[in-house]
Image (spheres, rainbow, N blue to C red):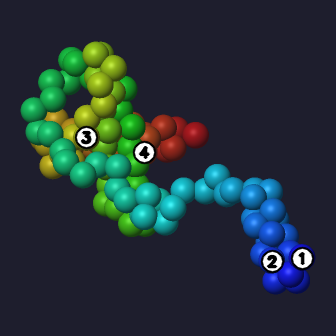
Amino acid sequence: MDLRLLAIMALLTLAMHTHVSDAKPISLVERCRCRTTVNNVPQRSIRKLHFLHSPNCSFQVIARLKSNREVCINTETKWLQQYLKNALNKMKAKRQTQ
């Protein structure tokens, strides 16, 4: 056998047995989860709120609805602003009592 052919076969065999990384591609890591937001989500239809903040994306609020659907809420929505303000006030009051 030709030495070059043997070397190529050895490299191909080695390449087939190497571990493939489970890491996400950079393009998926840097992508923001909320690309579009909604303004008109009724509070009574929300089961849970998730707050996300990453270096590449602004503050994001994701609501899981009672229908198990997830939507991104506009952070400028008035009821959400009031909700966050009340939550911060509760946290401050809790710290002062400790």
Q: Position of residue 70 (x, y in %)?
A: 30, 31
Who comes first in sequence, dot 2 or dot 3?
2
Q: Nearer the viewer, mark 1 or mark 3?
A: 1
Q: Marks 3 and 1: in contact by CB < 8 Å?
A: no
Check the image and report above or below for 1 versus 73.
Answer: below
Task: Tell me where residue 14 sits by quadrant.
Answer: bottom right
State which quadrant residue 41 falls in.
top left
On the rendered image, what quadrant is the C terminus found in? top right
Q: Nearer the viewer, mark 2 or mark 3?
A: 2
Give the Cα separation between the discs numbered 1 and 2: 7 Å
Q: Is residue 89 or residue 41 the one in the foreground?
A: 41
Under tag 4, what secondary structure? helix
- The residue sitting at 86% across, 81% down in the picture is 2
The 10 Å Cα crowd at callout 4, few under 14, some 14 to 19, many 20 or more, is few
- Disc 1: which residue: 1
Q: Which residue is mark 4?
A: 92
Q: Residues within 10 Å of mark 3 (few under 14, many from 20)?
A: many
The image shows residue 51, relative to residue 54, as above or below, that is above
Instruction: Work out whether mark 3 precedes mark 4 in sequence or the reverse, and give the earlier one.
Output: 3
**Tag 3's secondary structure?**
strand
Secondary structure of the residue carrying tag 1 is: loop
